[in-house]
Amino acid sequence: MRVLYLSAEAGLGGAERSLLDILASMRRAQPSWTLNLIAGADGPLLEHAATLGVSTLVVPFDGRLARLGEYGTGPLSLLAKITLAAPAAVKYAAKLRRITESIAPDIVHTNNLKMHVIGAWARPAHAALVWHLHDFIGSRRLSAFVLRAASGRASAIVANSASVAEDARAVFDSHVPVVMVHNGVDLDRFSGAGDRVDLDRLSGLPPAAPGVVRVGLVATFGRWKGHTTFLDAVAALPADLPVRGYIIGGAVYRTDDSQYSIDDLKRYASDRGVADRVGFTGFIERPEYALRSLDVVIHASTSPEPFGLVIAEAMACGRAVIASNAGGAREIFTPGLDALVHAPGNARDLAARIVELARDPQARQRIGQAGRKTAEQRFDRARLATDLVPVYRKVAHA
Ligand code: GLC
């Protein structure tokens, strides 16, 4: 079997890291299969995939296509943007089709919205198309419309959570079978033992006093990841509580307006009077080092999180997690047992949970240990190939 993966992005956001886990899991379970990856940009995704033995190729998007995104644009201006980007997309799909024909895959597995659409045009006639949904699309009317129009060319949809699967079933009206495959984690890499990083130094802050509880949000800079909720929560903490906050991550995507810049967030932190209580580390290539360096990991998405890979990774590292209680994220944990939760966007609620854990090291340890156990039982990435291979076999025409 020959599987070709298509990714619009090559930075390491959640969907790209999930793809790397799939590639690693597939490589191990099916060593004789040929795995190819084509990305719309060059970046760390390709290097990591190549070290797993995947053949990689960059077929770059033109700038307009790369920047096209739905965030913060009304339907009309989005329609205008799509219209402007359409010729580039058509040209790109034609070029990609010539390349995919020479690769002759049995399966084309696309990993993000742009590639779902482009893949529908570019897949060779004999290849089956599998869309891997990492997002809710029901609420994105134009994306839903475009995908619905292209869905006749897809043989199966993989959804990263039951919530995303339910949303997809509503959008596609059961035209395309939807299979739920929760993400997985490399349990050796994401574990309690191993290297850490000096978060203070990376943030340019003086070393924190001994006994300070390190609480951090690890996320891309997408505007719905709850950075301002987290900063508001830090601002609401008692001044004498020994807590230092960290914002770990950067703007890894190329789409217009969808992300904060680090300066936006630093300004917000100083407006809230917490500039000296919160460190900004920038993007950290090895998220497991960052997670292990924290006592409490915050997930604060203000919209329902499709899955929330960082939650599963933090649990695998034995960290105490406080998560935003909505969407697919709720399928990962049992509140009170292996994570604490707060209402999405509610900074007071989040601050109350931080206070609880900052004052109770035993609770941090108990939750962290329970989290590791959950990760071992449910999120070992070896499961990814076990779940996906039957999907590929079922839809492959060969
Ligand atoms: C996207 C989703 C995130 C999920 C990841 C991997 O980044 O926003 O919730 O964890 O994909 O599926």
Image (cartoon, helix red, strand yellow):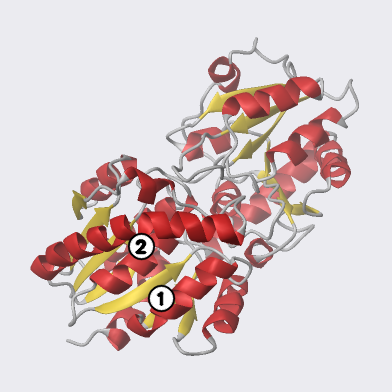
Vertical position of residue 322 compared to residue 395: above or below? above
Q: Quadrant of the N terminus?
A: bottom left
Closer-to-camera residue (193/233): 233
What residue lies at 24% left-to-right and 84% top-to-bottom? 396
Please give the label number shown on residue 91: none
Ligand 1 within 8 Å of the CB at mark 2: no
Q: Nearer the viewer, mark 2 or mark 1?
A: 2
Quarter where residue 361 is shown: top right
Most distant residue in the left direction: 102
Q: Nearer the viewer, residue 144 or 291?
A: 144
What amino acid is found at the position of numbered circle 1 in the picture?
Asp
Q: Which residue is mark 2?
A: 115
For label 1, the residue is 387
Q: Residue at x 39, y 43 (%)?
A: 11
Based on the displayed image, in which of its 4 quarters is residue 7 positioned? bottom left
Q: Of residues 208 and 18, which is closer to you in this image?
A: 18
Q: Is 326 above or below relative to 147?
A: above
Give coordinates of residue 170: x percent, y percent.
60, 82
Where disc 1 sits, the SS reads helix
Q: Quadrant of the C terminus?
A: bottom left
Instruction: Tell me: 219 left or right of 212.
Output: left
Q: Position of residue 139 (x, y in %)?
A: 64, 68
Apparent side of residue 231 relative to residue 135 in the rendered image (left or right): right
What is the x, y in percent for residue 336? 79, 57
**Residue type of the residue flagged with mark 2:** Met
Compare residues 298 and 327 and report the one nearer the observer.
327
